[in-house]
Image: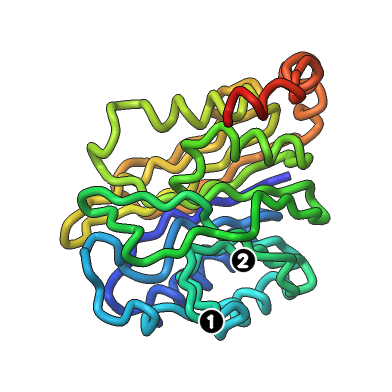
Amino acid sequence: MKIALIQQSCSDDKNQNVERGLKAAKEAAESGAKIICFAELAFEPFYPQYQNPDQPEKKAETIPSPITDAFSEIAKEYEVVIVLNLYEKDGDNLYDSSPVINTDGSILGTTRMVHITDYACFYEQDYYTQGNTGAPVYNTPFGKVGVAICYDRHYPEYMRALAIAGAEIVFIPQAGSVGEWPEGLYEAEVRTAAFQNGYFTALCNRVGEEPRLTFAGESFVCNPEGEVIAKAGTGNEEILDCDVDLEAVETSHAKRLFLRDRRPELYKDWIE
């Protein structure tokens, strides 16, 4: 199976960004991709660069929305699965959300980012409510898909929960900037998650210069052995294609050893 990560930069023109995303999704589907993933807030500026936003709810949208409707048409036409990431409004709450669109154009569900950070140029607590959808895994025609939105990937509890729920591939929509972490650390972290949990990981990062941040790109895919099997370039837009064989999940070290030998009866007391 081929997957595609759309590494796309964003201008201030949201409509133009969406049109470019739709074009990229069609290109990926026509090249044979079965699951297509976009980066965090893929079609709009990275709002949390700025503190104390004025009426941030005006920047958010409901799900479904005209954007999800447009991508649903592509998913149905090409019979592909699409993982988006949008700024969602639900009542008085605002979420960093990834709707997962199935091959028939329906929305299988929406994953909302659980852990919300706050530090320089990532003032996310000014924008997002803590997610309330847990760590769902979606049964698609191409495999069992989990989503870990950006900051959630730092939490082994969240990444393990996806494994316990049966995820075979975990997509990570990210907004990772140049110099944010020590060189190679976030890649090592995602490789380790793939190895410890026995699934593929596919991190799709933003790219390009914005007023206060430069996003790195460098999207990549890891196999269940923790090996990077595809990687996009630094600083440039591209569609990263990668062939994955989900049968490797069942023969992974995690499936054969780590998950088998867990002691969950102990962990609750340890963590609390």
32 relative to 211 in the view: left or right: right
- Mark 2–mark 1 Cα distance, whole angstroms, equals 17 Å
Quadrant where the C terminus sits is top right
Q: Position of residue 49 (x, y in %)?
A: 24, 60
Q: Position of residue 185 (x, y in %)?
A: 37, 27
User: From what the image shows, is residue 234 above or below residue 122?
Assistant: above
Q: Which of 129 and 101 is in front in this view?
A: 129
Dot in front, 2 or 1: 1
Q: Quadrant of residue 80?
A: bottom right
Disc 2 or 1, which lies upstream in sequence? 1
Q: Where is residue 174 in the image (x, y as percent from the top left)?
A: 43, 50
The circle on residue 134 is none
Circle 1: is it few (<14), some (14-19), or many (20+) Cα within 10 Å?
A: few
| Residue where numbered disc 1 is placed | 91
Q: Nearer the viewer, residue 30 or 272?
A: 272
Q: Position of residue 248 (x, y in %)?
A: 76, 27
Residue type, mark 2 in image: Pro
Residue type, mark 1 in image: Gly
Q: Nearer the viewer, residue 186 or 89?
A: 89
Q: For the point 79% across and 56% down, which residue is it? A: 140
| Residue where numbered disc 2 is placed | 99
Quadrant where the N terminus sits is top right
Q: Is mark 2 on a helix, strand or loop?
A: strand
Q: For the point 27% across and 75% down, which residue is it? A: 12
User: From what the image shows, is residue 86 above or below residue 228?
Assistant: below
Q: For the point 83% across and 55% down, which residue is it? A: 141
Q: In which quarter of the image is residue 224?
A: top right
